[in-house]
Image (tube, rainbow, N blue to C red):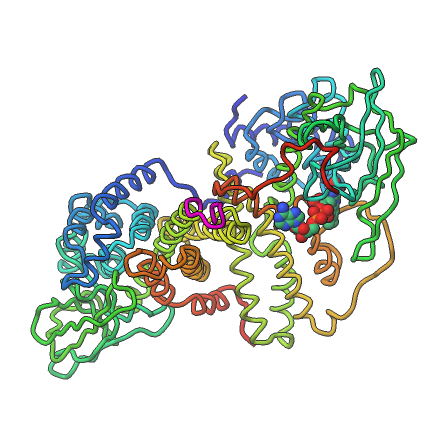
Amino acid sequence: MTLDDSQLQGRTREFLAAHPPASTPRADFLAARFDAGLAWVHYPEGLGGLGLPRAQQAVVDAELEAAGAPDNDPRRIGIGLGMAAPTVLAYGTEEQKRRWLRPLWLGEEVWCQLFSEPGAGSDLAALGTRAVRDGDTWVVNGQKVWTSNAHNARWAILIARTDPDQPKHRGITYFVCDMTDPGVEVRPLRQITGEAEFNEVFLSDVRIPDAHRLGEVGEGWRVAQTTLMNERVAIGGMRLPREGGMIGPVVTAWRERPELRTHDLHQELLKLWVETEVARLTGERLRQQLVAGHPGPEGSGMKLGFARLNQRVSGLELELLGEDGLLYEDWTMTRPDIVDFTGRDAGYRYLRAKGNSIEGGTSEVLLNIVAERVLGLPSEPRTDKDVAWKDLSR
Amino acid sequence: MEGPVQVSTSVDLLYSETEDQLRAAVRDVLTDHCTAAAVLDRIESDEPHDRELWKTLAAEMGLAGLLVPEKLGGQGATHREAAVVLEELGRAVAPVPYLSSAVVATELLLGCPAERPQVAAQIGELASGRLVGALAVPFATAPHAPYARVRRSADGLLHGTVTAVADAAAADLLYVATDDALYALSADQDGVTVTPRTSLDLTRPLADITLDGARGGEPVSEDPDTAVRRALRAGAALLASEQLGLADWCLTETVAYTRDRHQFNRAVGSFQALKHRLAELWLETVNARAAARNAADALATASPEIPLAAALAQAYCAPVAVHAAEEALQLHGGIGMTWEHPVHLYLKRAKADAIGYGSAGRHREALAELMDLRAP
Ligand SMILES: Cc1cc2nc3c(=O)[nH]c(=O)nc-3n(C[C@H](O)[C@H](O)[C@H](O)COP(=O)(O)OP(=O)(O)OC[C@H]3O[C@@H](n4cnc5c(N)ncnc54)[C@H](O)[C@@H]3O)c2cc1C
């Protein structure tokens, strides 16, 4: 289907007229929106979309926002929306797509990501969680770590080793794991912020039906690339207005509390303001490239810049606040339902931002990716490529 | 809920097909006629400006008239196209007075009353590339800063000195401001002396202008402020595109060099310490492109955000170009330190550009004012 922006706008307005947000219960509104193809317009018809270019979602969002429509609270279901869904869409069977995408988008089912392990972080392909076939099911044993939102999740995307005799990238298979399986144990891992957004997950004889495999056996690494690429865009790619995001509270404090200002912080603030605004324009340019159908390599860099700026801006904020910067809202250990980088107070923002350069691929690893895949620089000599996984050093 | 679709903001940060074609055409000419070796030979000669190249670009290709409406003898294009030309000129460190004449002096005249015959005539001359114009203010002048003025004595003659004017030695027409008027002087008229200075950037040489009883004739404007601010703002905004082109050359060359150069039995570009530095530089150029395009588009659409976009572009792109050139030199090793290798041309241009039309710090000051982020 093709619709130009004003046709899509018209369609959204018709939908809003038929389902007035003020008088429609939230769950009904969201379900109707999904079924009208206005959930994510770049998805196929019947799966919440209209098969339109991704960037046209902005047309729908602008209309819905103006009408005060409820959203599906993306902060609660970020991993589902940003990572699981595009992978299910790319590799799932028709039946899998029908089963999972609708409740995922509606927020009825929360997803988490069982990728990282104690022994496999940046070198994710070295993972050791084993999946052994037993007729129509797979029996999974191992440990995952840093699993955000596992305590709320109904489903997990999981990668596990199905053939230890192959080199590490080749013996991996991608599954969808039912988090209510009795073999899944989720233990909170407290973070520097005091709360436990992430967890350790122990998998003991977890049984996964073969029907919950995504992609071919042994092809899991390729499937995981879809997840990881989407993760980087999801983390760095939010569309913000000028002075949105981390810089917002800083410029407000600067304007409202002249007594806090120093010359040194002034210089730093102006530099960060410039970098933030330029990063916003870079994101905008990237979106325009997508609309024009010429996605550039710029996307690979968005998360890098995002992490660095968040860290520098939140650091400046604490210093600017002086005495208030010495205080912290609350260290109580909780298990939050949402992931929100800019929420809570300045101290929280400062601490949470530290994770931005680790989660979804560390900044060091992303720089390697830019250097090799965008600039075409040679890779470091590798000692792990053609060695069977079971013979690797650990 | 009627109203226009507000999706993508009105800013267009991409390159159009025409702009891509223009780029290819300019690059072809520069590849043939502006090699690094040729630029190196020229900069120490008596004629640092490349008049032949200027003729090709300005007159034959019509590039000097991009900003000028057709009825005034120009091409009726916009700052977006001029920005693409400047990217290419930056990539080649081309020694032609494009920014000074086809952008700054031209914008100056476009900011003067067009009904004056001498204004229209001079716009036409600059647009055709037959004459080169230069605004007589120091190259370091920021758009919002005080600028150089000369004095008009009781007998109506002009007196004063303006130092370090970009491309003044190549100019046929010099534009000088007094407190209440703007005059066009001929570079070879009586009472006008142009003295070349030894410049850090030999590809955009500076000269001092001394007026000792020069006849101003009919002024081109009685409102020098409006015209000069407009000219400097366009200069600063489009300089960002030159800086982008320059940074892009440095990155591309250095990636190619480090892939090729072997030490310790491997390409030096496979060492992570260098890969990370080049990846960082790539990120900076990606951002610089967004900032430069934003500035060019703001000018092209006469956006109310021109002052913001210009200051933002200079505050961001100026240090990026310098960083790119400095990294290029370091990652080339000893060869990067030689006169023979062109990287020093880029370093000198980048560093001079970082001062030209106001340093990044000056532009951040402007932003502080515009965004109400005031000093203590
Ligand atoms: C807040 C947060 C939430 C997370 N959520 C999830 C989740 O939901 N699901 C999930 O699966 N994972 C999650 N992670 C895990 C995250 O993906 C990993 O922490 C990350 O990939 C790094 O792995 P690691 O912790 O083992 O560090 P390591 O890989 O051990 O890295 C240690 C250091 O070495 C550097 N390094 C490693 N390899 C290289 C190299 N080749 N070149 C240069 N430097 C290198 C790293 O950059 C780092 O500085 C989360 C992490 C955080 C912080």
Question: Does residue B148 appear to the left or right of B133 in the view shown?
Answer: right
Point out residue B180 in the picture as x, y percentages from the top left corner.
Answer: 24, 74
Question: Does residue A273 appear to the left or right of B243 in the view shown?
Answer: right
Point out residue A363 in the picture as x, y percentages from the top left corner.
Answer: 62, 50
B352 falls in the magenta region: no
B233 or A306: which is nearer to us?
A: A306
Q: Can residue B306 be seen in this view?
A: no
B271 or A35: which is nearer to us?
A: B271
Quarter holding residue A313 = bottom right
At a point 46% along the width and 44% down the height, the residue shown is B10
Q: Which residue is situated farthest in the bottom direction here? A: B154
Point out residue A379 in the picture as x, y percentages from the top left corner.
Answer: 54, 42
Point out the image quarter for the C terminus of chain B: bottom right
Span of residues in magenta: B259-268
B262 falls in the magenta region: yes
Q: Is residue A200 visible?
A: yes
